[in-house]
């Protein structure tokens, strides 16, 4: 196996915000040359694949300022420092949609943008959903939408479903239904 | 449908790097309150689902400084300004792996981190692969790895496959084989 690692020579902090931090690292490449790496540090996030008894996927409609666009996403949220990802997933699902899950099960986790960010998302599957009252933060604006599989893929085609975690969850959902059918 | 949009009140540029830019926007929320949004601007990227005649997925092993980890990813690369995404996908596939595709077909596109970045990835499917010589940039260090589907899912479980585009591509590949079987 080839040596691929980069050694850190120096690291400079550029920005320390509410959610992300930015640093620029100087690195030594495997061939001895040097380069720089622009790195966004993020606390990590969780997301939930929640399917109702009527076999509908639970989504939230949300405005995303970086995209200047409103999209449909599976319920998700950032990790608080030290927070257990599964507890965070349970909390976000309930706050954003009102649904409580009897149990949550890890499905998959992935880095969203390994070239420039360390954000990792842990996706859980919610089982045994019970409907209840949503109670989002006063400054959080989301709208719950429930879609059958065919409708969800139609929204994917229309780019209303348009982010990594939701696209992944959609294919996992479909694959499970294909495998079990 | 609820009003969810945020209005930009002010935008401050924080950093303008080789790959990303960072800005902090002040926004007006739907309830009239104000908040700030930390936004990373990225040129966008492409990635390629390439499966060989032997039904193996073409991956590249690559060190990712933000993760301090070497992972297996589908061939991918950043868009140059004004570059056609499909041409970029063709170029990256050939440079990183040596494979030429007879044709490329759009599979799906998604935003990787809609909460803090505008990075979009366009995933293409390569058809009619012909092996050739890889010719990566001198300062780019990648190693080509080809895996059968079961092996690929095993690497996903071991978190060697661990990023959004590759996880998505893997499930799409499985999806197609489930549908066609």
Image (tube, coloured by chain):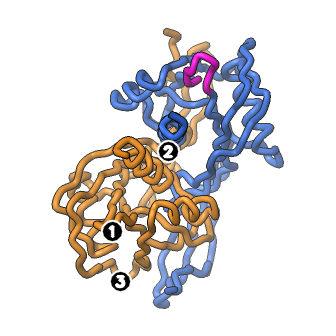
Chain colours: A blue, B orange
Up the image or down, A113 lies above or below B175; here it is below
Badge 3: chain ID: B
Kindly check if marks 3 and 2 are in contact, taking CB atoms under 8 A apart as contact: no
Question: How crowded is the residue under tag 3: few (<14 C-alpha within 10 Å), some, or many (20+)?
Answer: few
Task: Name the residue at 61% across, 78% down.
Answer: A8
| Mark earlier in primary sequence (3, 2) | 2
In the rendered structure, which segment of residues is drawn in magenta?
A: A51-59
| Mark earlier in primary sequence (2, 1) | 1
Q: Position of residue B41 (x, y in %)?
A: 44, 48
Badge 1: chain ID: B
Residue with the mark numbered 3: B138
Badge 2: chain ID: B
Question: How crowded is the residue under tag 2: few (<14 C-alpha within 10 Å), some, or many (20+)?
Answer: many
Disc 1 and disc 3: Cα gap in Å?
30 Å
Task: Name the residue at 36% across, 54% down.
Answer: B45
Mark nearer the viewer, 2 or 1: 1
Up the image or down, A83 lies above or below A69; here it is below
Magenta segment: does it hold A17?
no
Kindly check if marks 1 and 3 are in contact, taking CB atoms under 8 A apart as contact: no
Disc 3 and disc 2: Cα gap in Å?
29 Å
- Which disc is residue B94 wearing? none
Is residue B12 visible in this depiction of the protein?
A: no
Where disc 3 sits, the SS reads loop
- Which disc is residue B117 wearing? 2
Residue with the mark numbered 1: B54
| Mark earlier in primary sequence (1, 3) | 1
Q: Position of residue A50 (x, y in %)?
A: 63, 28
């Amino acid at each position: 196996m080839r040596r691929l690692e980069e050694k850190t020579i120096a690291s400079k902090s550029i920005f320390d915000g509410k959610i992300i931090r930015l640093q620029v690292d100087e690195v030594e490449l495997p061939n001895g040359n040097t380069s720089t790496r622009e790195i966004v540090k993020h606390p990590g996030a969780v997301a939930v694949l929640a399917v109702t008894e009527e076999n509908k996927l639970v989504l939230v409609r949300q405005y995303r300022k970086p995209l200047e666009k409103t999209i449909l996403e599976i319920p998700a949220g950032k990790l608080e420092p030290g927070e257990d990802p599964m507890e965070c997933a349970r909390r976000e699902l309930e706050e954003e949609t009102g649904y409580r899950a009897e149990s949550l099960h890890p499905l998959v986790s992935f880095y969203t943008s390994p070239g420039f960010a360390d954000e990792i998302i842990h996706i859980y599957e919610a089982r045994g959903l019970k409907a209840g009252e949503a109670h989002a933060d006063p400054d959080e604006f989301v709208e719950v939408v429930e879609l059958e599989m065919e409708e969800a893929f139609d929204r994917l085609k229309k780019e209303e479903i348009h982010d990594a975690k939701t696209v992944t969850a959609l294919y996992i959902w479909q694959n499970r239904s294909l495998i079990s059918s």
